Image (tube, rainbow, N blue to C red):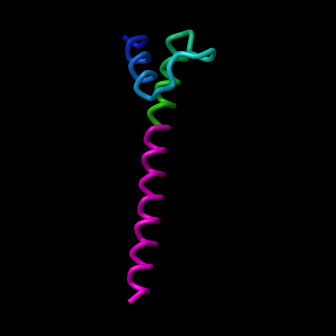
Amino acid sequence: YISSIYFIITSFTSIGYGDIHGYTKWEQEFLLLMLIVGIGFYGYMIGTIQQLLASMVTTDMLTEE
């Protein structure tokens, strides 16, 4: 089961299979955890940047009047 979940998550995150990959079950579990944390962090950063840009546009619109 770990190998199938590992394949799905690496394909989903568009990392794919490269030269560096987990050989044992423990390595694959660690990589899955790192991929999931990475996806969460990436989403958080994109949301933060979007909020920052949206507040800058709103401020510009208010100051132009």
Quadrant of the snapshot with the N terminus = top left
Q: Residue at x 48, y 44 (%)?
A: 42
Q: Is residue 33 above or below residue 61?
A: above
Q: Which percent across, then down, holds residue 38?
A: 50, 37
Q: Residue at x 41, y 63 (%)?
A: 51
Asked where in the image residue 50 lies, by quadrant, the reply is bottom left
Can residue 55 be found in the magenta stretch?
yes
| Numbered label tally | 0
Q: Is residue 41 magenta?
A: yes
State the residue lying farthest toward the right.
19
- Residue located 41% across and 54% down the image: 47
Q: Is residue 36 above or below residue 55?
A: above
Question: Can you give x and y, in whole percent of width and height, for residue 7 in the image?
Answer: 43, 15
Between 62 and 9, which is closer to the camera in this rendering? 62
**Of all residues shown, which one is farthest toward the bottom?**
65
Principal SS element in the magenta part? helix
Which residue corresponds to the image point at 42% horizontal and 86% vertical from the top-left? 64
- Percent from the top left, x then y, of residue 37? 47, 37
Quarter of the figure with the C terminus = bottom left
**Residue 57 vertical placement versus 65 (above, below):** above
Q: Is residue 65 above or below residue 6?
A: below
Numbered range of the magenta stretch: 38-65
